[in-house]
Image (cartoon, grey):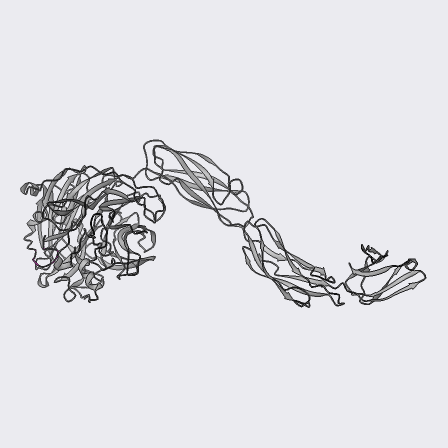
């Protein structure tokens, strides 16, 4: 019960933790058989008659559940449902200052509460049936001397209770530890003989290691269809590095033997590889076909932890094998210790400057194996790195092979609220309840919970709800000699599934109760949550197709069958996808007849050859009848399957000109239109033309907007009056976005339009114009009567398409010499 508070404080201070081997086969996969040291039978109701219980406080009215704070990971999800019932479990009594270590279990007709020092049986409405001291319950197993040394037995010789109800065997299972640091140090286990806890119980006592006074701390309880397992940390002497931690012992009991009142057969695994701050928690296995017992432990280390590890026990009963399994890792990290170390009081509360110690971040309450997954919850200290500012709850769904299926947080990023000591339960529908304590400077420490429906978005819980509001500050520092005024809270809590319907979820949590006799008090409180019957519509994804239509199919589902007609309306809504273009808008009403749990909504998606980004639209639910709506919207994603278009650039020719900077305009062309913006780099390169002499160098990113199929790219030519050969330069394409390149180079031919006229002659009234030509070009000869503006040039008849020969050619302007004056020029076609 006190292990981590003190040992971890020593570790944080730099002391050495001895990781010694216990006696026996410490590191082997197989264990050592054994039987209980003592056995007895006790009747709970008879004990209650023999010893009058303290007067029970009358049941208190249930507070209204409040959604004061939605965990950061949930992002605006709906509130958790209000408790269907809520009442007192057990309040700290006068003279008892020990923390409760809150435990409770639910059976077909009873509730059972186990806190340090006291066992209580209630009916399912909260009425008290029997209350006995734990020393009286276990008394038939011998004397429990306790000790006077600083430690967990200074007030109670029996400590760290754990209580479960086994739905397979319909039995109650109770464990405790006793007599730390004495030769009488023991593990105690009791099983009811029927589903009625007020009747007879088979009790067993296992002396742990009397010659060396080894004792167990922080026992943990789990079960499968075949086994009951109890494990805990072993110590020699008190929590001192020189004599302290000896490893972890696992007692794997033959469940059939215990239920039959047999010898208390078990297999003992003594494992030395677990450090003192790496607590291994067994699973409550609710799958009757599973023959493997699973364990889960948080990663080792005080800061920046980011892993869990799975362990298993398997094999025939009596010949079990312990195996180390896969490591579960996440990119998210947390610290194992609060700021200031394991004993630090850092959790705030209203009405006092005294704070409460959150302790370390190992898994404290039972993990669940259900429907093929492991579920766990534990508090962690954030942010990681050695100086966390808040305590938050981390919860997991993990596959047996180590795959993280879900992970979430109950977390207040602003640091106003801290959350600690969670318990988790999962019903047959994979609906989840996490119960815990909440701490804040603007409230007294309270009992809280958060719910998750099976169809809720992955990694989310619904809003934080108050089960029982705190009533006063709490300051009961644990023995100053031992731990330096540590203001302790219970080491763990319990959240369980109801065996009557395997659907309802119960939690028992600690809160700060009203002081009595001048002493601050803790209290424990029950709450039953009936999962609401929700309709949930799930997201869907569909590939668009190239033509025609494809259906996007949404599934609307109920978590369980119903006995009435349920209806809900639905309608589509645009996201980045547009109705009419990308999909066909639709609406209607879903009707679930009694017994039906699934309906489909089909939305027609239009196919095309248009390359575009994936697009989204929504289906929204409204106007429910006979049901609640927790999540009203699902997203449809249209996955584009069209390849990106290809870009090409053309070749061009351009006349040089005599002056200025004429344009040479290339065209970028797409093989098909695109719904995305396309870009490509266009950069000039020399051919026979020279940059800055014949053209202006250019290096640009050209963009083709969505829907367009072409885009011009213009390069400036440097004109001149020099007679020269035709010249070329290039535009090269590279680095396309949302497209490929089909033709990466465009060529520009600069056509020289400067020509040497060799002669102009008059012949018999005609004019003969001779000029030098180039092959592969055609020319025209033009004339004008005046060089005064405006100059009007007209072609010389018969000289509009003169073929170049590479030599001098002549053109005749008939009767040209008969004009008063006439001027000529030669141009390229």
Q: Nearer the viewer, residue 716 or 529?
A: 716
**Quadrant containing the N terminus in the rendered view:** bottom left
Q: Which residue is at the far right?
A: 764
Asked whether the viewer can see residue 697, the reply is: yes
Q: Is residue 155 magenta?
A: yes
**Quadrant containing the C terminus in the rendered view:** bottom right
Q: Quadrant of residue 280?
A: bottom left
Q: Residue at x 33, y 53 (%)?
A: 404
For the image, the number of numbered tags is 0
Q: Position of residue 714 (x, y in %)?
A: 65, 58
**Span highlighted in magenta in the image:** 146-156
Q: Is residue 419 magenta?
A: no
Q: Position of residue 481 (x, y in %)?
A: 12, 59
Q: Nearer the viewer, residue 414 or 7?
A: 414
Name the chief secondary structure element in magenta: loop
Q: Determine whether, in the image, residue 615 is placed left or right of residue 748.
A: left
Q: Determine whether, in the image, residue 279 is placed left or right of residue 541.
A: left
Q: Position of residue 783 (x, y in %)?
A: 84, 58
Asked whether the viewer can see residue 250, the reply is: no
Q: Nearer the viewer, residue 818 or 97?
A: 818
Q: Position of residue 558 (x, y in %)?
A: 35, 38
Q: Determine whether, in the image, residue 133 is placed left or right of residue 27.
A: left
Q: Quadrant of residue 646?
A: bottom right
């Amino acid at each position: 019960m006190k292990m981590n508070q003190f040992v971890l404080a020593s570790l944080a201070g730099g002391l050495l933790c001895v990781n010694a081997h216990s006696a026996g086969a410490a590191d082997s996969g197989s264990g050592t058989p054994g039987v209980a040291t003592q056995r007895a039978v006790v009747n709970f109701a008879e004990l209650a008659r023999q010893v009058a219980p303290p007067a029970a406080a009358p049941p208190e009215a249930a507070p209204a559940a409040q959604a004061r704070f939605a965990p950061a990971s949930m992002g605006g999800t709906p509130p958790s449902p209000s408790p269907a019932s809520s009442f007192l479990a057990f309040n700290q009594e006068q003279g008892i200052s020990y923390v409760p270590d809150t435990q409770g279990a639910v059976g077909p007709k009873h509730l059972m509460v186990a806190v340090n020092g006291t066992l209580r049986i209630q009916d399912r409405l909260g009425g008290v049936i029997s209350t006995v001291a734990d020393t009286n319950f276990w008394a038939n197993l011998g004397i429990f001397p306790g000790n006077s040394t600083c430690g967990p037995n200074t007030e109670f010789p029996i400590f760290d209770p754990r209580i479960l109800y086994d739905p397979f065997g319909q039995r109650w299972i109770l464990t405790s530890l006793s007599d730390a640091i004495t030769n009488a140090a023991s593990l105690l286990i009791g099983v009811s003989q029927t589903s009625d806890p007020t009747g007879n119980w088979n009790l067993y006592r296992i002396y742990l290691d009397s010659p060396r006074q080894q004792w167990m701390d922080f026992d943990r309880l789990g079960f499968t269809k075949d086994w009951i397992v109890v494990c805990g940390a072993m110590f020699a002497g008190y929590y001192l590095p020189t004599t302290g931690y000896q490893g972890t012992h696992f007692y794997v009991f033959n469940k059939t033997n215990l239920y039959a009142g047999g010898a208390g057969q078990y297999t003992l695994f003594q494992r030395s590889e677990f450090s003192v701050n790496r607590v291994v928690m067994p699973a409550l296995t609710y799958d009757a076909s599973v023959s493997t017992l699973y364990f889960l432990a948080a990663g080792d280390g005080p800061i920046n932890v980011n892993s869990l590890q799975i362990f298993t026990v398997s094999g025939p009963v009596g010949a079990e094998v312990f195996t180390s399994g896969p490591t579960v890792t996440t990119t998210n990290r947390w610290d194992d210790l609060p700021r200031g170390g394991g004993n630090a009081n850092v959790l705030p509360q209203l009405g006092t400057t005294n704070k409460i110690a959150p302790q370390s971040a190992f898994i404290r309450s039972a993990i669940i194996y259900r429907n093929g997954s492991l579920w766990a919850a534990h508090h962690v200290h954030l942010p990681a790195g050695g100086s966390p500012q808040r305590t938050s709850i981390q919860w997991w769904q993990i596959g047996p092979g180590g795959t993280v299926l879900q992970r979430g947080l109950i977390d207040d990023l602003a640091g106003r609220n801290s959350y600690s000591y969670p318990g988790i339960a999962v019903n047959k529908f994979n609906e989840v309840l996490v119960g815990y304590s909440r701490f804040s400077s603007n409230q007294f420490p309270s009992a809280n919970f958060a719910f998750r429906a099976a169809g809720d978005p992955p990694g989310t819980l619904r809003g934080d709800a108050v089960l029982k509001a705190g009533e006063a500050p709490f300051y009961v520092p644990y023995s100053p000699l031992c731990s330096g005024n540590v203001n302790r809270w219970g080491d763990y809590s319990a959240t369980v599934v109801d065996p009557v319907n395997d659907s309802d979820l119960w939690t028992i949590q600690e809160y700060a109760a009203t002081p009595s006799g001048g002493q601050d008090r803790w209290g424990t409180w029950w709450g039953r949550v009936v999962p609401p019957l929700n309709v949930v519509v799930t997201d869907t994804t569909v590939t668009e197709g190239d033509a025609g239509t494809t259906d996007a199919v949404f599934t609307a589902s109920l978590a369980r069958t119903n006995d009435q007609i349920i209806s809900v309306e639905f309608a589509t809504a645009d996201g980045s996808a547009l109705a009419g273009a990308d999909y066909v808008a639709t609406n209607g009403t879903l009707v679930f007849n009694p017994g039906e749990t699934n309906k489909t909504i089909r939305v027609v998606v239009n196919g095309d050859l248009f390359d575009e980004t994936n697009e989204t639209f929504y289906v929204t639910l409204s106007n429910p009848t006979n049901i609640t709506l927790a999540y009203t919207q699902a997203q449809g994603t249209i996955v584009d399957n069209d390849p990106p278009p290809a870009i090409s650039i053309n070749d061009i020719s351009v006349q040089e000109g005599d002056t200025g900077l004429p344009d040479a305009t290339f065209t970028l062309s797409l093989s098909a239109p695109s719904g995305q913006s396309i870009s490509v780099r266009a950069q000039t390169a020399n051919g026979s033309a020279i940059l800055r002499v014949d053209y202006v160098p250019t290096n640009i990113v050209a963009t083709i907007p969505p829907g367009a199929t072409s885009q011009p790219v213009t390069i400036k030519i440097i004109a001149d009056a020099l007679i020269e050969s035709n010249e070329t330069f290039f535009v090269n394409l590279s680095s396309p976005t949302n497209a490929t390149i089909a033709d990466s180079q465009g060529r520009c031919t600069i056509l020289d339009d400067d020509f040497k006229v060799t002669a102009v002659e008059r012949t018999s009234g005609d004019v003969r114009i001779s000029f030098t030509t180039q092959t592969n070009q055609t020319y025209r000869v033009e004339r004008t009567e005046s060089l005064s503006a405006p100059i009007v040039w007209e072609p010389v008849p018969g000289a509009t398409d003169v073929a170049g020969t590479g030599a001098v050619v002549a053109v005749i302007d008939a009767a040209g010499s008969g004009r008063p004056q006439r001027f000529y020029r030669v141009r390229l076609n």
